[in-house]
Protein backbone atom coordinates (compact mmCIF):
# COMPACT_ATOMS: atom_id res chain seq x y z
CA UNK A 1 0.00 0.00 0.00
CA UNK A 2 1.20 3.47 -0.86
CA UNK A 3 0.94 6.47 1.45
CA UNK A 4 1.79 10.12 0.88
CA UNK A 5 3.24 11.46 4.11
CA UNK A 6 3.85 15.13 4.93
CA UNK A 7 6.29 15.70 7.78
CA UNK A 8 6.88 19.12 9.33
CA UNK A 9 9.79 19.24 11.76
CA UNK A 10 9.87 21.69 14.68
CA UNK A 11 12.81 21.16 17.01
CA UNK A 12 12.52 23.44 20.04
CA UNK A 13 15.30 25.99 20.46
CA UNK A 14 15.65 24.74 24.06
CA UNK A 15 17.00 21.36 22.86
CA UNK A 16 20.81 21.43 23.18
CA UNK A 17 22.55 21.62 19.78
CA UNK A 18 24.53 18.40 20.40
CA UNK A 19 21.33 16.49 21.22
CA UNK A 20 19.62 17.85 18.10
CA UNK A 21 22.63 16.85 15.96
CA UNK A 22 22.60 13.32 17.46
CA UNK A 23 18.87 12.88 16.76
CA UNK A 24 19.28 14.18 13.18
CA UNK A 25 22.13 11.71 12.55
CA UNK A 26 19.97 8.84 13.86
CA UNK A 27 17.08 10.04 11.69
CA UNK A 28 19.33 10.05 8.61
CA UNK A 29 20.55 6.50 9.25
CA UNK A 30 17.00 5.22 9.94
CA UNK A 31 15.55 6.91 6.86
CA UNK A 32 18.35 5.69 4.59
CA UNK A 33 17.91 2.10 5.80
CA UNK A 34 14.18 2.33 4.98
CA UNK A 35 14.95 3.85 1.57
CA UNK A 36 17.35 1.00 0.81
CA UNK A 37 14.68 -1.53 1.86
CA UNK A 38 12.21 -0.04 -0.64
CA UNK A 39 9.71 0.95 2.06
CA UNK A 40 10.46 4.70 1.65
CA UNK A 41 10.78 5.14 -2.14
CA UNK A 42 10.37 8.94 -2.25
CA UNK A 43 11.74 11.62 0.08
CA UNK A 44 11.48 15.22 -1.13
CA UNK A 45 12.32 18.43 0.69
CA UNK A 46 9.65 21.16 0.64
CA UNK A 47 11.46 24.21 -0.71
CA UNK A 48 12.09 26.78 1.99
CA UNK A 49 10.70 24.68 4.86
CA UNK A 50 12.02 22.12 7.36
CA UNK A 51 9.48 19.69 5.95
CA UNK A 52 9.23 16.87 3.46
CA UNK A 53 6.77 14.99 1.32
CA UNK A 54 7.46 11.27 1.29
CA UNK A 55 5.92 8.16 -0.23
CA UNK A 56 5.94 5.01 1.87
CA UNK A 57 5.29 1.55 0.44
CA UNK A 58 4.28 -0.67 3.35
CA UNK A 59 1.83 -3.50 3.97
CA UNK A 60 -0.69 -1.83 6.28
CA UNK A 61 -1.78 1.16 8.33
CA UNK A 62 -0.25 -0.55 11.34
CA UNK A 63 3.15 -0.96 9.63
CA UNK A 64 3.13 2.70 8.58
CA UNK A 65 2.26 3.85 12.08
CA UNK A 66 4.98 1.64 13.56
CA UNK A 67 7.52 2.93 11.03
CA UNK A 68 6.66 6.60 11.54
CA UNK A 69 6.52 6.36 15.33
CA UNK A 70 10.10 5.01 15.34
CA UNK A 71 11.47 8.06 13.50
CA UNK A 72 14.00 9.63 15.88
CA UNK A 73 12.51 13.05 15.03
CA UNK A 74 8.94 11.77 15.60
CA UNK A 75 8.50 13.69 18.89
CA UNK A 76 9.29 16.90 16.99
CA UNK A 77 7.13 16.27 13.91
CA UNK A 78 3.63 17.08 12.76
CA UNK A 79 2.71 14.27 10.36
CA UNK A 80 -0.16 14.07 7.88
CA UNK A 81 -0.87 10.78 6.09
CA UNK A 82 -2.82 10.39 2.83
CA UNK A 83 -3.50 6.81 1.67
CA UNK A 84 -3.11 6.48 -2.11
CA UNK A 85 -5.19 4.34 -4.49
CA UNK A 86 -4.57 3.70 -8.17
CA UNK A 87 -6.01 6.45 -10.38
CA UNK A 88 -8.33 5.00 -13.06
CA UNK A 89 -6.60 7.10 -15.75
CA UNK A 90 -3.07 6.22 -14.69
CA UNK A 91 -1.01 4.28 -17.25
CA UNK A 92 1.56 3.28 -14.62
O1 LIG B 1 14.63 16.30 7.23
C1 LIG B 1 13.45 15.90 7.29
O2 LIG B 1 12.59 16.22 6.46
C2 LIG B 1 13.02 14.99 8.43
C3 LIG B 1 13.50 13.61 8.30
C4 LIG B 1 13.11 12.81 7.16
C5 LIG B 1 14.16 12.12 6.72
C6 LIG B 1 15.29 12.56 7.41
O3 LIG B 1 16.46 12.17 7.29
O4 LIG B 1 14.93 13.53 8.27
Image: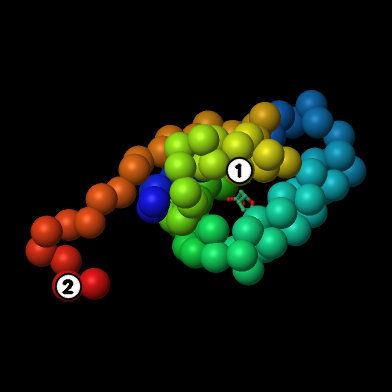
Figure check: 87 above or below 82: below
76 relative position to 29: left or right: left
Residue 9 is at least partly visible in this image: no
Residue furthest out toward the right: 18
Residue wearing tag 2: 91
| Mark 1: secondary structure | helix
- Quarter of image, res 70: top right
Residue drawn at x 86%, y 39% as measured from the top left? 19
Q: Does label 2 or label 1 sit earlier along the sequence?
A: 1
Figure check: 65 above or below 42: above
Observer-nearest residue: 43 or 90?
Answer: 90
Observer-nearest residue: 92 or 17?
Answer: 92
Residue wearing tag 1: 67
Q: CA distance from mark 2 to mark 1?
A: 30 Å
Residue 8 in picture, x, y percent from top left: 52, 39
Figure check: 43 above or below 75: below
Residue drawn at x 72%, y 41% as measured from the top left? 72
Observer-nearest residue: 83 or 1?
Answer: 1
29 relative position to 67: left or right: right
Residue 14 in picture, x, y percent from top left: 79, 27
Amino acid sequence: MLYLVHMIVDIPASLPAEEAARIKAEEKAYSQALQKSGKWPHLWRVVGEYANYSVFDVASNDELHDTLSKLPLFPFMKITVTPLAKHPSSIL
